[in-house]
Image (cartoon, grey):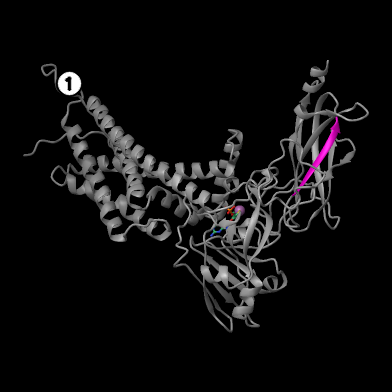
Amino acid sequence: MAEKIKHAGILTGALIGLLLTAPLIALIYLGQQLAGLPFLPFDLFDWLARVTPGALITFTIDRMVDLLTLLNVGDLSEAAKTSEQMMGVATVLLIGTILGGLYAFIMRRTQAGQSQYLIGMGLGFLFGLPLLLISNAVNFNATADPLLSLVWFITLFIGWGGSLAWIYSDISDLPLQRPENDALALNRRQFLVRVGGATATITLVGSSVASLLNQGDDDDTRQQIADAGTSNANANEGDNDPLPNADDPVQPAPGTRPEYTPLEDHYRIDINTTPPTLDGASWQLPVMGLVDNPTTFTLESLQNDFTQVSAYITMGCISNRIAGSLISTIKWTGVPMREILERVQPQAEAGALRIVAADGFDEYVRTDLLMSDDRIMLCYAWDDQPLLEKHGYPLRIHIPDRYGMKQPKWITEMEFVPEWEEGYWVRRGWSAEAQVKATSVIDTIATEQAFQNDAGTWLVPMGGIAWAGDRGISQVQVSVNDGPWLDAELRSPLSERTWVVWRLDWPFEEGRHTFRVRCVEGDGTPQIAENSGTRPDGATGLHGERENLRELPAMSNEA
Ligand SMILES: Nc1nc2c(c(=O)[nH]1)N[C@H]1C(S)=C(S)[C@@H](COP(=O)(O)O)O[C@H]1N2
Ligand SMILES: [Mo]
């Protein structure tokens, strides 16, 4: 009769599961960096974000943004990405922990001493298989051979399960307390500490090597960007391509955000933890459906066979809060959509264009709108260089006056269909039209740069931006402590599709003040003052800043 083994507890099993999942993730990361294999934790998060009901995912993202705002994290869209990535890794750790506990539970229940390795490896397989299927469905970046991928992950996950069985059985063989007559023997706790040490070492070494490789990649892309030629990002600094309003007498108040967003600072929002990687040379854009002349375009033909147009454009995300950072201005270059329409000839019954992107994102644009707005552009360059991967390489669309959610990146297919339908975010409860709401923001109250006017009055420069899609800004006003609305000066914008920089030199008064800003659209429509959150139509409400102004630094210098 076999002796009954005293199996370690479920918590111990869970702990072993956790300890083994950390190096597992490190090795997956290493595989990504070394061989372009998919990084499953990110794919898992991307997939979760897709299958989770819109309201729940929006709620979660909103809470996350709240938290990050509270923590005062500098770049919100970057930070949001980082925490999404952390959530992906944490989910995989959690699954590994649960499976470790489950393994211990099975062992205690069945006393399956003989088949322990089979059970462990089976669990490893069950762990890996769904992740692999998910990755297969959502990952567009992995460049590795799918067969290599299969072998790699089966080895890793079965190895994970085998190690789980091995460590668990070793630990179950050990006494809880060290036997008094054997100074070299370990007890369970000491053994676990050793296991922890070993897994931590693998995790650390694996992820450090992968990080180093990753660093190299970043340097490469930066080099490519540098090589790509002239950049507009420093157009302010007076190189060969000055901004069109460089000579405007109204200069931004010190501390106003850059009127032209440097490419590397442009906000980024999409449903991917890492952007799809498309090959521009082999990429094709079929424009099909209800058209007389279905045509497949290459990137080269879009760049060479059609008119090239450029425009300074401000884009904002519908989930940008009042005074949030999910809004930027950059130079867009591409083909007028009109010329594509002329080529393919949409039929009378083509009610809308369905645009499909490489990441599974889709949007519909009404044919009427495409026909009536010549500014709609298929865009292949930002800041005078090919789109960066994260911003939609090789092709994205620009539609004036709409939030970013209506403007797919990484376009792979266009199809004219009979009727307009709800696109990706609309199906998840966001606005069908997503027309930009007027917004105005105080960027700076530059007490440090206060100056005296001819009459000897101290003036504090303050300023910021105002934007109403393509509808223009006719007036910006500031009110101090709910007093009268003072007119700000408006700098001529980079284009009728960009934000307007405003400035007000305010006669200094000591004390605790609340500054509030509002704008008026080009046609006289006032900015909506009533507060409403971002969902579903985009945020409204006035931005305010509270400041406790003591004596000005400049005034004390004077004294
Ligand atoms: N294919 C695809 N296109 C997309 C998205 C996406 O998730 N997938 N996100 C949209 C949203 S919500 C915004 S705000 C803009 C942001 O573009 P940017 O990241 O280049 O600034 O891209 C839009 N286009
Ligand atoms: Mo967005």
In the image, residue 399 lies at what x, y percent? 66, 63
Furthest residue in direction left, as rendered: 1
Please say whether residue 15 is visible from this viewpoint.
yes
Give amino acid for label 1.
Arg
Which residue is more in the foreground, 333 or 296?
A: 333
Q: Is mark 1 within 8 Å of ligand 1?
A: no
In the rendered structure, does residue 141 fall within the stretch colored magenta?
no
Mark 1 crowd level (few <14, some 14–19, many ≥20, 10 Å Cα): some
Seen in the picture, residue 426 relative to 158 is either above or below; the reply is below
In the rendered structure, does residue 505 fall within the stretch colored magenta?
yes
The residue pinned by badge 1 equals: 178
Which residue is more in the foreground, 235 or 70?
A: 235
Question: How many discs mark residues in the rendered view?
Answer: 1
Q: Quadrant of residue 543?
A: top right
Which residue is more in the foreground, 275 or 456?
A: 456
Magenta stretch, overall SS? strand
Furthest residue in direction right, as rendered: 455
Which residue is more in the foreground, 45 or 218?
A: 218
Q: Is residue 406 left or right of residue 100?
A: right
Q: Which residue occupies 33% across, 34% down?
A: 204
In the image, residue 347 lies at what x, y percent? 63, 82
Quadrant containing the N terminus in the rendered view: top left
Quadrant containing the C terminus in the rendered view: top right
Q: Which residue occupies 24% across, 44% down?
A: 106
In the image, residue 76 lies at what x, y percent? 59, 42
Q: Specify the segment rendered in magenta.
A: 500-507
Q: Is residue 33 left or right of residue 165?
A: right
Please say whether residue 413 is visible from this viewpoint.
no
Q: Which residue occupies 51% across, 45% down?
A: 81
Q: Quadrant of residue 409?
A: bottom right
